[in-house]
Image (cartoon, helix red, strand yellow):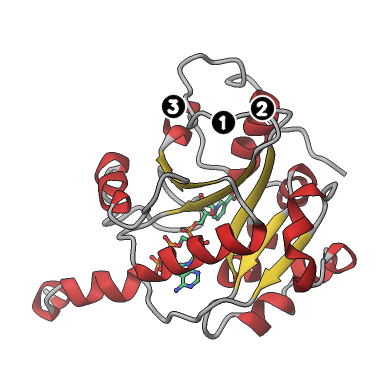
């Protein structure tokens, strides 16, 4: 079921994901992080613990393909802000999609598996993204490339679990009690992690930082 994904940049020496070792368990949490907030850190820490990860990469996107880029600050600036939340030696902040020349997750994950075939990667996203996953480019291929951990988010659990993608992938859903074995599963494989809920969002933070007069004028 894997769709064809462009591989022209796969050998590029200009693309530098964080260093990693064969056999390591690495979570990749892609995001706009415009700006990052404590909800992201709660999700990252919970995923690291529950999935038994050796590393967790905060992957700063050049721009979510489904979101407007209006008001999106540069990758470097967002990386600097994310470093304040990505605490501890196991968390890495990277913007390698920019060098790869893509903002499509299917291409990014195919690149990672090609570059590091012996690393056990897992894609991490919030339940809001599960709800819209069927609109992502090559979403079925993404599920074929690596396991997926979905982290709970207020108001999104049921919408995520009843979404077209969740229903299509339902037979490959792992009970949450088996989350630690997720990275060892042959994809498709996914689970939903119940985590400490945070209703923080970047949209709310951006709105709070923008005076009403500036929005309406
Ligand atoms: N409060 C939260 N709880 C759980 N997961 C979250 C939370 N906020 C964001 N995420 C997840 O973290 C990843 C990065 O999120 P993102 O940078 O888009 O933040 P956001 O708050 O959703 O932004 P925006 O409001 O601009 O859409 C996404 O997979 C998203 O689902
Ligand atoms: O590949 C896609 O079509 C696609 C569509 C929507 C979102 N994504 C990715 O999902 C990640 C989370 O995005 P966001 O904006 O919710 O933080 C980020 O890495 C995006 O590039 C990817």
Residue 175's label in the rendered image is none
Pointers 1 and 2 in contact (C-beta within 8 Å): yes
Q: Which residue is mark 1?
A: 20
Q: Disc 2 beta carbon < 8 A from ligand 2?
A: no
Q: Secondary structure at mark 3?
A: helix
Q: Residues within 10 Å of mark 2 (few under 14, many from 20)?
A: some
Residue 116's label in the rendered image is 2
Marks 3/1: CA distance?
18 Å
Marks 1/2: CA distance?
8 Å
Q: Seen in the image, is 104 located left or right of residue 16?
A: right
> Which is more toward the observer, 168 or 17?
17
Pointers 2 and 3 in contact (C-beta within 8 Å): no
Q: Earlier in the sequence, mark 2 or mark 3?
A: 3
> Which is more toward the observer, 114 or 203?
114
Nearer the observer: mark 3 or 1; the answer is: 1
Where residue 213 sits, quadrant-wise, is bottom left
Residue 4: % across, % down: 77, 33
Q: Residue at x 81, y 72 (%)?
A: 175
Q: Secondary structure at mark 2?
A: loop
Q: Disc 3 beta carbon < 8 A from ligand 2?
A: no
Q: Residue at x 74, y 79 (%)?
A: 162
Nearer the observer: mark 1 or 2; the answer is: 1
């Amino acid at each position: 079921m894997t769709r064809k994904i462009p591989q022209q940049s796969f050998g590029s020496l200009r693309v530098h994901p964080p260093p990693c070792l064969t056999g390591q368990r690495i979570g990749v949490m892609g995001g706009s992080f415009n700006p990052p907030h404590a909800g992201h850190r709660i999700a990252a820490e919970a995923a690291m613990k529950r999935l038994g990860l050796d590393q967790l990469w905060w992957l700063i996107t050049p721009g979510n393909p489904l979101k407007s880029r209006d008001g999106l600050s540069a990758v470097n600036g967002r990386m600097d802000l994310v470093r304040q939340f990505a605490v501890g030696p196991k968390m890495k902040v990277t913007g390698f999609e920019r060098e790869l020349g893509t903002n499509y997750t299917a291409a990014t994950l195919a690149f990672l598996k090609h570059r590091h075939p012996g690393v056990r990667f897992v894609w991490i996203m919030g339940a809001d993204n599960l709800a819209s996953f069927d609109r992502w480019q090559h979403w079925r291929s993404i599920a074929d490339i690596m396991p997926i951990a979905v982290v709970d988010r207020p108001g999104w659990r049921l919408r995520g679990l009843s979404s077209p993608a969740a229903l299509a992938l339902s037979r490959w859903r792992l009970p949450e009690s088996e989350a630690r074995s997720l990275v060892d599963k042959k994809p498709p494989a996914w689970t939903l992690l119940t985590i400490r809920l945070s209703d923080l969002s970047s949209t709310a933070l951006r709105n709070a930082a923008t005076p009403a007069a500036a929005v309406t004028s």
